[in-house]
Image (cartoon, helix red, strand yellow):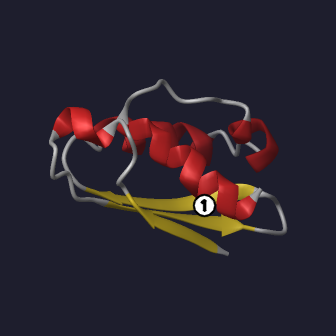
Amino acid sequence: MVAETSISVAGSYLVSPDYSGHAKLVIDAARGVVVGATFVGADTAELVHAATVAIVGEVPLERLWHAVPSYPTVSEVWLRLLEQVC
């Protein structure tokens, strides 16, 4: 299963008023965990780090859903992605 969205969340405005980016998660639906992630755009290092923790730790999607990102930040894109798979 794949979840993808543009990174056009409220927090992206803090990086740039015309921020452009893309995010994708690859989900192992049988296990309910993230197995891959791609983030394209400025200041996506925080997104990559969170994805690394989720993948290496095999954090269940239901648990990730409750890890609410800071607002306003680019990390809000996690909510848009998880809404598609939870």
Relative vertical location of residue 14 with respect to residue 9 in this rendering, above or below: above
Q: Residue at x 38, y 40 (%)?
A: 10
Side (left or right) of 80 relative to 1: left
Q: Nearer the viewer, residue 10 or 23?
A: 10
Report x, y in % for residue 15. 19, 36
Residue at x 52% of width, y 62% of height: 36
Can you tell which quarter of the image residue 31 is in? bottom right
10, 48: nearer the viewer: 10
Q: Residues within 10 Å of mark 1 (few under 14, many from 20)?
A: some
The residue sitting at the right extreme is: 30
Residue type at numbered disc 1: Val
Residue 59 in the image, given as x and y percentages of width and height: 71, 41
Q: Residue at x 81, y 44 (%)?
A: 62
On the rendered structure, is 44 left or right of 4? left
Task: Label 1, secondary structure: give it.
Answer: strand
In the displayed structure, does residue 71 sit left or right of residue 35? left
